Amino acid sequence: MIRVLVYLLVVAALAAGCVWLADRPGDVVIVWLGRRVETSVMVLLLAVMLIAVLATMLWSLVRAVMAFPRSVRDSLRARRGTRGYLALSQGLIAVGSGNVIAARRFAEEASRLAPDEPLTLLLRAQTAQLTADREDAARNFELMASRNDTRLLGLHGLFIEARRRSDPTAALFYAEQAAEHASVPTWAGTAVLEFRCAMGDWDGALKRLQRNMESGLIDKATFRRQRAVLLTAQALAIEDSDRDRAKELALEAAKLAPSLVPAAVLAGRFLAEAGEQRKAARIITAAWGANPHPDLADVYAHLRPGGSARERLRRIQALAALSPGNVEAALAVARAALDAQEFVIAREALAPLAVVPTKRVAALMAELEQAQHADEGRAREWMKRGLHARRDPAWTADGFVSERWLPVSPVSGRLDAFEWKDPLAGDDHGTAVIESEHADVLDQREPPAQPSQDIVQLRKEQPGKPAESSPASEIVEPQAAVSLPGERTGWRSRTGSPIQIPPAIIPLMHAPDDPGPGPDAPSGSDSQSNIEESPAPNWTRIRQLFR
């Protein structure tokens, strides 16, 4: 409505002006170069307007002629940019779909059309990874790392390439460079923390953990839990050399994470030695309420040194009452009752578990039959059942079974990965379980360049099935060393059949942390099905820290 009013006002003003000029025609006389020109005001105005229009048209024509080369240049540049964009987008799609030939063609076209674009460097690096050209991939990642806009992405790619060639020193260097950035990427903070743990540098790991929390990479609850794990690991490492410092660390860890069994066990043991039985009992019972564990029961039973077996039994019964119906509680009572020669109590504790016994239950029943009735026949029968019984809970992380708790997983390098559970429960580790008694074989492997011939026996038991369902002669040989943090190791049986391990999630596009096939993989569109498992350093250093 306002626009209509404005339009009407403008038209009225122009009409009024024309009427005013018509009522006052007037004369205009121009004398120029000896010539005299006489005309009216209206004619003069029309002539001026015509001249202005012609001048404007002429100037526009001159400008168009002068701007024609630049217009052609801009048009060609826009066309070149469009072609470059299409080459980049189609190249990244080709990389994600595993089309090596198309990825290489689009990478060359993008390099020709848009050589300085960050995505061009990424496409070239991804194509090099897809074709197993590690040197070219590293060169492109170095170029990306030298630029401010792609520095973190380049460092991430260099970090992955260092892991691929089993160079932990270079991988740590690149991760630390990325971690110094103002916005610390999650992968860098996690990688530096895992490498510090792998080297046994607990002080450095604690500092890195603090920075991760300050940078917002982890929440406060995760920080408290992981700090408790690191403090416990540090306390275990200095337990024999500096017991006072180890006690302080264990108490702080138990305060940060009351449910962390190793911290509670260590703190309870130190407090019991110092004569602080009540404080030790509070820590043990708090941890027991969250995670009943035989080590907690053992420490609780020996809070008062020199006590009789019957006194230990009474303590264990009081502790077991906090978790009625729990298997670990029943086993702890049975063990204490056998030591106290209270066979009736032991049998009552084991009776519900003997219906479907585990190996520990079968061993305790065999000991009970031998001690109570001296019945060697029944004892041997229980021992035989124990050979085929299902597994007991153990410290397990990523399918690796350890005889003792460790702060990090030797398979993935993940901090606080070990859980007290049935190694075959769940599907997070595939069908293969690395036995703890064979872990030393892993530590003695040779570098990937000279494949080791050591043999590691893997037991492929299924939940709910007896052990004889898996061939006892099933022996597997490692195809690669134990992997670095974040990597997985491939295993192949002596008969040649691969052991199935659930693959990682396949992204739509090969990001720098999904480096593609190995250098020995065949090129071409069929090479994507043969993904090389990357080698990694052995974990002897970690295991020696807790022996």
Image (spheres, grey):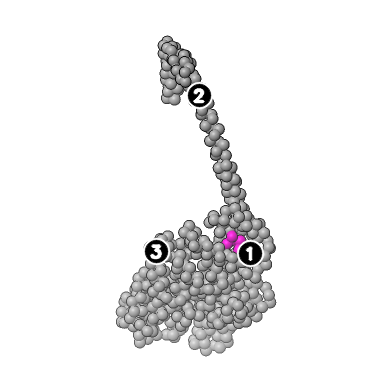
Three-letter amino acid code at the position of disc 1: Thr
Which kind of residue does numbered mark 3 sit on? Met
Residue 89, placed above or below residue 440: above
How packed mark 3 is, by other alpha carbons closer than 10 Å (few <14, some 14-19, many 20 or more), is some
Residue at figure coordinates x 57%, y 65% from the top left? 137
Q: Position of residue 519 (x, y in %)?
A: 63, 69
Q: Is residue 398 visible?
A: no
Task: Report the span colored magenta.
Answer: 124-128
Residue highlighted by disc 1: 131
Mark 3 element type: helix
Residue at the (50%, 63%) spot, across then down: 145
Which residue is denoted by mark 3 in the rendering? 213
Q: Quadrant of residue 309?
A: bottom left
Place of residue 168 in the rendered image (x, y in percent of width and height, measured from the top left):
51, 73
* Above or below: residue 506 compared with residue 403: above
Number of the front mark, 3 or 2? 2
Q: Nearer the viewer, residue 490 or 166?
A: 166
Going from the N terminus, do you reach mark 2 or mark 1 first? 2
Q: Secondary structure at mark 1?
A: loop
Instruction: Verify whether residue 484 appears in magenta.
Output: no
